[in-house]
Image: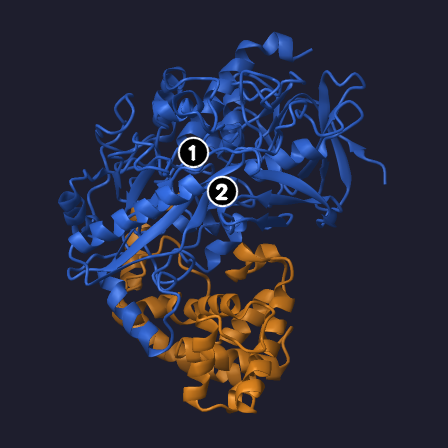
C-alpha cells in the first residue's frame, strides 16, 4: 500500500508526553509550525478516574517490550499511552542532579561524564521550576538554585512517624520538592492531598500536560495527531538531512509526514528504537549510530522500598503518591564503603491505597487469607513506607536493542531492554536497605521489612556527549550526523544520578528549544 | 478542571457508612450476577477454578466477581484492560490465565488426587502456600509464584480496591472522579 503523503510542517515531534508537549509549546510560542504525533488515543481530564483499577488505562498499551537482566520489569507501568503520555500518571517528584552526577567519569574513573556541567544547566532548572510550578523548602543537601515558587506541602502524619528514625540516625528529613501546587498557582488549584496522583490529577494541582503544556501549545497553534505511531525517520539521499517521519495511523495505513526538523520525544526505549529502526544505506546501524553507542548505556535506578506498621495512626491513603518528605543527606558520598558505589536518595511517606503495584496489599505479597485481611485492616491506618533510589553505573552492556526474531503488531523488530545492576551498585543498594531498616526500627515500628530490589525510571540509550565517536547527540540532543534531528527526554542522560529524572529532562528541553529558536535560520531551509 | 467544591461534595458522598450500605447491597447483587454469569474467554469450569483459587487468597473474591473481572478484561484489547498483568506481561494474557488454571488443577490432582475445587480448606491453603514458596511439584508454566502474584492482585482489586472495599478497611475514598462502576 502506498504511503499517504501529508502537508509539510516545520517541526514534527514524536510523542506528546512531558518532553514532547513542553518542546511543542516552546517552539509553537516561538512561531514554529509544529505537529505532534502521539501513538495513543486522545485523553481528557475526565479519564483521570480516582481508582487504581481504572487508572491502568492510562499506561502503555503500544508495542511489546522484552526485558531481560536483573534490573528490569514493569516498563508498561512506567510509560503512558495517549495525550500527555506518562505525564498523566507521573508522581511529580522534582529534583536536580548534583554537580558530581555530571562528572562521574572524571571524578571516579567509572560510568560517564556529561558534556555540560551543573552550572550550565542551573538557569534552565530555575526556569523549569517556575514553568511547572514547584513546591518545596530549603534543603542544604540539594544543589544551589533559585527558591521554589511555592512553599512546601505540609508534613504528613506518615512522615512525622518516620522522622523519629531519621533523627535517631542523625539524618535530616526535609520537605519534598514536587511539581504539585501547595497553594493555587498559575490558574491551577492547590493540592487537596487525597493521594490519587498515581491515577491522574484532574484538578490540575499536579502539573500534567493536559493542564499545563497542551493548553499553551494549542493556543500557539500546535497541531496534535493521535493514533499515529512513528516507525522511522527518513533522510535525503545524501544522508545529511532528515526529510520527515513515517507513521502508521489507526487504520494501519503508512503515512509520510515531511518536516524541516524532526524531534524524537517518545520515552527512553522508543527514542532509541526509533533511531535504530531508521537505518538506511547511509546509516546501516541506525540513525545517529556512527559511534556504535546508540541503544547503549541504558540505566535505571535501583529501588528498594522499606515498609512498616507504626503504633500511631499514619493516614497512609492521604498525601501525594510521590513522597511527602525527602532525605538527601549523604547523596554526594558516592563511595560509602569499599566496593560499593553510587549516590542514594530517600523518598519518604508515599500515599498508598490498598491495591496496585505500590499498594499496601502488595507490600506483603506472601500474605493470603485471614492473615492478609488482618494485615490490611491494620495497614489501612498504621502503614508507613519509604523508597531509596540508588545510582546505576552507565555501562555499554546495558542497552536497548532490536530483536529481529520477534515482531511487534506493526511487523517491526521488537524492542529488547537488557539491564543488570553492576556489582558495586548492588553493594550500594544493600547498604541502603540496611540503613532503611535501621531507620524504621529506630522510628518505633512494630514491624519493618524491605521489598525486593526493582528498577525505577528508564534512562540513557541515546546519550549526549562532546565526542561524536562516543555519543549519539551533542548537549542539545542534536544527533551528530544529521543536524535537523533532535532527541528529547531522559534517554539523553549519560548518567542517572539517584533522583527522579523529570526536572532534568525539562531543563534540557527548555535549553534545546532555545537552541532551535536561536538557530532557526540554519535549521529551516 | 474539577473544582474543590465538587471534590468536597464527593468526599461526603463517599462517607464510610454510606459505602458500607452500598457494599451490602452490591454483595447481594454480585452474588446473583455470579450465579447467572456467562463468560467470554473462560469456560465455567475455568472460571470456577480461578474464583476458588482467588477466594482462598482473598476471602470474598469469588462473590466479588473476580472470575468475571478477569474474563471481562481479557475480552477487549490491552488498551482497555483493567488487569495488573498488562504492566508485566501483556503478550498473551488469555494464555497466561488459561495455562495457570490448568496448572492449578494439575498440581491439585498430583498432590491430592482431586481438583482444586474439591479440596479441603487446609489442602487449598497448602497449595497457595506452595505457590508463595515456589514449591509446586508439577506446575511449571506460567511460573506459579508469578501466577499467584497476579491472581492475588486481581482478588485484592475486586475485594479491597473498590469504593466498597475501601469502606470495609475504614479508608475514606476521597475521589476526584468516582469510577463509573467498581471495575
Residue A337: image tag: none
Q: Furthest residue to the right?
A: A1
Residue drawn at 29 percent across, 56 percent down: A307
For the C terminus of chain A, the image quarter is: top right
- Left/right placement of residue A201 relative to residue A269 reads left
| Relative horizontal placement of residue B55, taking residue A519 as reference (left or right) | left
In which quadrant of the rendered image does the N terminus of chain A lie? Answer: top right
Secondary structure beneath dot 1 equals: helix
Q: Position of residue B89 (x, y in %)?
A: 58, 58
Q: Residue furthest front?
A: A338
Colour used to depict chain A in the structure image: blue
Which residue is identified by label 2?
A: A86
Left or right? Give the position of B169 relative to B109: left
Among numbered discs 1 and 2, the one appearing first in the sequence: 2
Q: In orange, which chain?
A: B
Quickly name the residue at label 1: A502
Q: Nearer the viewer, residue A478 or B175?
A: A478
Examine the image and state in which quarter residue A441 appears: bottom left
Front residue of B118/A422: it is A422
Indicate the secondary structure of the residue bearing disc 2.
Answer: helix
- Residue sitting at x 60%, y 84%: B45
Amino acid at each position: 500500500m502506498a504511503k499517504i503523503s501529508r502537508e509539510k510542517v516545520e517541526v514534527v515531534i514524536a510523542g506528546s508526553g512531558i518532553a514532547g508537549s513542553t518542546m511543542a509549546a516552546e517552539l509553537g510560542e516561538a512561531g514554529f509550525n509544529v505537529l505532534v504525533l502521539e501513538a495513543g488515543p486522545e485523553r481528557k481530564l475526565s479519564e483521570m478516574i480516582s481508582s487504581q483499577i481504572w487508572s491502568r488505562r492510562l499506561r502503555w498499551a503500544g508495542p511489546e517490550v522484552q526485558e531481560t537482566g536483573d534490573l528490569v520489569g514493569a516498563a508498561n507501568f512506567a510509560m503512558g499511552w495517549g495525550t500527555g503520555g506518562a505525564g498523566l500518571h507521573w508522581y511529580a517528584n522534582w529534583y536536580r542532579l548534583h554537580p558530581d552526577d555530571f562528572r562521574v567519569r572524571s571524578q571516579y574513573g567509572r560510568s560517564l561524564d556529561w558534556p555540560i556541567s551543573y552550572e550550565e544547566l542551573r538557569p534552565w532548572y530555575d526556569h523549569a521550576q517556575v514553568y511547572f510550578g514547584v513546591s518545596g523548602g530549603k534543603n542544604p543537601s540539594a544543589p544551589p538554585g533559585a527558591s521554589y515558587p511555592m512553599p512546601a506541602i505540609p508534613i504528613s502524619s506518615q512522615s512525622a512517624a518516620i522522622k523519629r528514625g531519621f533523627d535517631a540516625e542523625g539524618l535530616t528529613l526535609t520537605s519534598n520538592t514536587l511539581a504539585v501546587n501547595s497553594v493555587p498557582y498559575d490558574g491551577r488549584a492547590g493540592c487537596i492531598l487525597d493521594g490519587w496522583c498515581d491515577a491522574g490529577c484532574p484538578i490540575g494541582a499536579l502539573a500534567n500536560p493536559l493542564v499545563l503544556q497542551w493548553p499553551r501549545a494549542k493556543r500557539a497553534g500546535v497541531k496534535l495527531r493521535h493514533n499515529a505511531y512513528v516507525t522511522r525517520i527518513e533522510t535525503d539521499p545524501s544522508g545529511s538531512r532528515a526529510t520527515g517521519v513515517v507513521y502508521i495511523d489507526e487504520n494501519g495505513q503508512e503515512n509520510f509526514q515531511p518536516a524541516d526538523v524532526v524531534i524524537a520525544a517518545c520515552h527512553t526505549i522508543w527514542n532509541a528504537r526509533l533511531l535504530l529502526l531508521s537505518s538506511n544505506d547511509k546509516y546501516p546501524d541506525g540513525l545517529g549510530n556512527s559511534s556504535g553507542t546508540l541503544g547503549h548505556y541504558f540505566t535505571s535506578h535501583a529501588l528498594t522500598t522499606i515498609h512498616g506498621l507504626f503504633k500511631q495512626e499514619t493516614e497512609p491513603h492521604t498525601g501525594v503518591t510521590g513522597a511527602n518528605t525527602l532525605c538527601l543527606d549523604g547523596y554526594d558520598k558516592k563511595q560509602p564503603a569499599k566496593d560499593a558505589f553510587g549516590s542514594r536518595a530517600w523518598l519518604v511517606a508515599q500515599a498508598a491505597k490498598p491495591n496496585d503495584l505500590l499498594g499496601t496489599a502488595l507490600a506483603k505479597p506472601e500474605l493470603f487469607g485471614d492473615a492478609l485481611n488482618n494485615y490490611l485492616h491494620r495497614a489501612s491506618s498504621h502503614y508507613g513506607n519509604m523508597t531509596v533510589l540508588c545510582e546505576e553505573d552507565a555501562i555499554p552492556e546495558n542497552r536497548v536493542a532490536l530483536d529481529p526474531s520477534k515482531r511487534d503488531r506493526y511487523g517491526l523488530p521488537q524492542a529488547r531492554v537488557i539491564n543488570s545492576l553492576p556489582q558495586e551498585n548492588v553493594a550500594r543498594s544493600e547498604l541502603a536497605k540496611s540503613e532503611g531498616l535501621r531507620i524504621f526500627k529506630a522510628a518505633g515500628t512494630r514491624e519493618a521489612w524491605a521489598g525486593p530490589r526493582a528498577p525505577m525510571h528508564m534512562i540513557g540509550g541515546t546519550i549526549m556527549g562532546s565526542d561524536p565517536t562516543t555519543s549519539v547527540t551533542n548537549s542539545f540532543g542534536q544527533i551528530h550526523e544529521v543536524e535537523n534531528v533532535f532527541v528529547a527526554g531522559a534517554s539523553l542522560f549519560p548518567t542517572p544520578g539517584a533522583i527522579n529524572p523529570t526536572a532534568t529532562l525539562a531543563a534540557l528541553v527548555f535549553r534545546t528549544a532555545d537552541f532551535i529558536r536561536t538557530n532557526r535560520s540554519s535549521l529551516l531551509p | 478542571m474539577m473544582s474543590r467544591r465538587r471534590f468536597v461534595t464527593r468526599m461526603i458522598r463517599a462517607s464510610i457508612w454510606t459505602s458500607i450500605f452500598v457494599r451490602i447491597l452490591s454483595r447481594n447483587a454480585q452474588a446473583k450476577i455470579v450465579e447467572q454469569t456467562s463468560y467470554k474467554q473462560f469456560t465455567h469450569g475455568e472460571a470456577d477454578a480461578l474464583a476458588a483459587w482467588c477466594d482462598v487468597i482473598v476471602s470474598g473474591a469469588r462473590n466479588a466477581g473476580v472470575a468475571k473481572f478477569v474474563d471481562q478484561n481479557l475480552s477487549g484489547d490491552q488498551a482497555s484492560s483493567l488487569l495488573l498483568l498488562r504492566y508485566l506481561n501483556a503478550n498473551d494474557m488469555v494464555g497466561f490465565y488459561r495455562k495457570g488454571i490448568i496448572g492449578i488443577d494439575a498440581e491439585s490432582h498430583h498432590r491430592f488426587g482431586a481438583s482444586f475445587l474439591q479440596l479441603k480448606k487446609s489442602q487449598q491453603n497448602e497449595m497457595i502456600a506452595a505457590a508463595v514458596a515456589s514449591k509446586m511439584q508439577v506446575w511449571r508454566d506460567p511460573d506459579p509464584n508469578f501466577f499467584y502474584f497476579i491472581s492475588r492482585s486481581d482478588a485484592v482489586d475486586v475485594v479491597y480496591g473498590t469504593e466498597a472495599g475501601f469502606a470495609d478497611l475504614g479508608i475514606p475514598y476521597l475521589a476526584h472522579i468516582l469510577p463509573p462502576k467498581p471495575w
